[in-house]
């Protein structure tokens, strides 16, 4: 029986179940969203033999683009969201394999922890459509997997695969080189000078090619990290602190059960030293008030959790893509208030706990997190989805510090319970947000295309952000049709030029949203 449990392919079965579970939802996607209009348009150009990137493209993209090209050749351009779903499930699979092969977790625990990543709202959002983030995540995780394989048993084949994966991650998005860049410093600190020299050579060649030969777009130049406005971010201590602490806080909230386990297991391991426990508690209390007193998220986006703008907000996924104030879901306020507070408390507890582990906290994960946080300070505009790469690194950093327990209760009972409970909540919330997002955007995009088929010019329709980027964004007074979450009573200014043409009830079985409707208004000529 024990041998059967050891060999049971739980990770593979879990990945297959995720694919089957979300296939029907993703198969319904008929819209482009956020930046994926750019990615989808680029693949359409690739299909016609034009491999030049659009000038509005800021990412290197080619890895994602070539994958999309081959997929579209077989299944068609409109099926690209299914490729993203496959890649997102592979994120789950590779992360679970890292935990199983390199962290000595059982298949069950590896699957549970990997589900924490999969159901993270930022990851779930990026699994819809043809966004870049989950593609970058896949190759970063592969890069990390082969790095750890090389560290466990040095084979040059693993080292080569490590850098090939980093190469592919970089040519999906520039920040995908994170693990490979951090490895250079890691090898230096470990006095592995041969590996450090080779890694430096790899980085110099790759970045040299990108700097001097890669066909960069205007947007890449605009979002470079060397212009004065970005340097000013570093000089603004409040801004820089809010970026770094905010990223760690959001990452801690998405990895909350791992943070809780880390804190509890650390206190358990030092339980015989009352002085150490007192020191940790006093430090945590001081840190809680100090860290949050200085924190000013309003400098970046919003003053309330989840703090950073763009894709995941209190009312759902990417609500500002459509005009008006979006409807909310039941328990919205309490969920985010308690989630935020709990994350702040346990992050404040976790930081002093690091003292217990001494030099062990200097590793590939902490180097990568620190480097990425510094890089994000220089970004022109910081969006919430930029936090996504930190989450698996944050989880692995905490898990690599764990000490074998003398009490199996902590790992065999408490760990699965706290992680499993969190996964259930996140799976429910993220799935609700995903269904709502698909239903609302499907309606808006489908209705807009229907209007175009009747002779309405697409640039005269105010639909979603992507529709506006694709066809041109009209402003309220110049739109023949516009979609909004607002009723005429909520937004009386609409009554001046518009009448209600249609409304769509977006309810679905088990929905937690309150009066989920979107309205189509027609301009009075």
Image (cartoon, grey):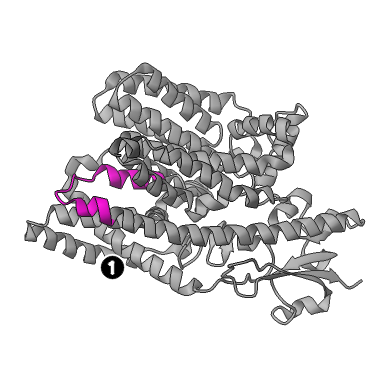
**Which residue is drawn at the image coordinates 50% and 46% (left, top)?**
228
Say if residue 481 shows up in the picture: yes
Is the residue 142 above or below the residue 255 in the image?
Answer: above
Task: Tell which residue pokes out farthest to the front in this image.
Answer: 1
> What residue did someone put label 1 on?
289
Q: Position of residue 372 (x, y in %)?
A: 41, 43
Is the residue 208 above or below the residue 68 in the image?
Answer: above
Q: Quadrant of the N terminus?
A: top left
Residue 406 on the magenta span: yes
> In terms of image quadrants, where is residue 96?
top left
**Which residue is drawn at the image coordinates 72% and 57% (left, top)?**
442
Horizontal side of residue 515 vs 77, given as left or right: left
Q: Magenta part mainly helix, strand or loop?
A: helix
Q: Position of residue 504 (x, y in %)?
A: 74, 68
Q: Position of residue 338 (x, y in %)?
A: 39, 70
Residue 253 on the magenta span: no
> In terms of image quadrants, where is residue 95?
top left
User: In the image, which residues are magenta?
Assistant: 392-414
Q: Please rate how many residues cluster around mark 1, counting C-alpha atoms within 10 Å: few if below 14, some from 14 to 19, many from 20.
A: some
Q: Quadrant of the C terminus?
A: bottom right
Horizontal side of residue 132 vs 390, given as left or right: right
**Which residue is drawn at the image coordinates 48% and 53% (left, top)?**
119
Between 96 and 222, the one nearer to me in the picture = 96
**Which residue is drawn at the image coordinates 52% and 29% (left, top)?**
168
Q: Position of residue 221 (x, y in %)?
A: 59, 38
Horizontal side of residue 43 vs 482, given as left or right: left
Element marked by disc 1: helix
């Amino acid at each position: 029986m024990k041998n059967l449990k050891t060999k049971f392919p739980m990770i593979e079965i879990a990945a297959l179940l995720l694919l089957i579970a979300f296939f029907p939802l993703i198969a319904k996607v008929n819209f482009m969203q956020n930046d994926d209009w750019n990615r989808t348009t680029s693949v359409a150009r690739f299909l016609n033999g034009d491999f030049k990137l659009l000038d509005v493209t800021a990412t290197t993209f080619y890895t994602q683009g070539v994958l999309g090209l081959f997929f579209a050749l077989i299944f068609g351009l409109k099926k690209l969201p299914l490729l993203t779903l496959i890649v997102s499930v592979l994120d789950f699979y590779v992360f679970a394999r890292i935990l199983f092969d390199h962290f000595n977790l059982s298949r069950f625990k590896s699957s549970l922890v990997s589900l924490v990543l999969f159901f993270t709202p930022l990851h779930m959002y990026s699994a819809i459509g043809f966004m870049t983030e989950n593609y970058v995540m896949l190759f970063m995780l592969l890069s990390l997997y082969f790095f750890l394989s090389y560290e466990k048993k040095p084979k040059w084949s693993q080292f080569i695969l490590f850098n090939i994966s980093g190469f592919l991650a970089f040519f999906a998005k520039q920040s995908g080189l994170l693990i490979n860049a951090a490895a250079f410093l890691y090898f230096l600190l470990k006095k592995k000078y041969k590996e450090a020299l080779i890694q430096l050579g790899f980085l110099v060649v790759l970045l040299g090619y990108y700097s001097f030969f890669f066909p960069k777009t205007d947007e890449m130049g605009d979002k470079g990290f060397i212009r004065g406005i970005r340097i000013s971010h570093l000089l603004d201590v409040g801004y820089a602190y809010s970026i770094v602490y905010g990223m760690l806080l959001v990452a801690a909230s998405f990895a909350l059960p791992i943070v809780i386990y880390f804190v509890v297991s650390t206190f358990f391991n030092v339980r015989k030293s009352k002085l150490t426990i007192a020191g940790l508690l006093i430090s945590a209390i001081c840190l809680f008030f100090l860290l949050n007193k200085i924190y000013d998220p309003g400098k970046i986006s919003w003053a309330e959790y989840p703090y950073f703008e763009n894709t995941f907000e209190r009312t759902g996924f990417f609500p500002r893509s459509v005009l008006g104030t979006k409807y909310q879901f039941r328990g919205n306020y309490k969920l985010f208030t308690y989630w935020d507070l709990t994350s702040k408390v346990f992050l404040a507890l976790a930081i002093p706990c690091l003292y217990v582990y001494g030099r062990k906290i200097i590793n590939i994960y902490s180097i990568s997190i620190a480097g990425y946080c510094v890089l994000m300070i220089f970004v022109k505009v910081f969006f919430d989805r930029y936090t996504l790469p930190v989450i698996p690194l944050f989880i692995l950093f905490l898990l690599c510090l764990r000490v074998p327990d003398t009490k199996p209760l902590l790992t065999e009972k408490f760990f699965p319970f706290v992680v499993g409970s969190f996964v259930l909540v996140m799976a429910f919330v993220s799935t609700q947000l995903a269904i709502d997002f698909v239903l609302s955007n499907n309606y808006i995009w489908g209705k807009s295309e229907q209007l175009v088929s009747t002779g309405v010019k697409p640039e005269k329709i105010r639909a979603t952000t992507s529709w506006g980027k694709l066809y041109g964004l009209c402003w309220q007074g110049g739109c023949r049709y516009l979609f909004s979450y607002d009723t005429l009573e909520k937004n009386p200014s609409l009554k001046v030029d518009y009448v209600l043409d249609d409304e769509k009830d977006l309810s679905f079985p088990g929905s937690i949203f309150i009066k989920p409707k979107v309205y189509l208004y027609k301009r009075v000529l």
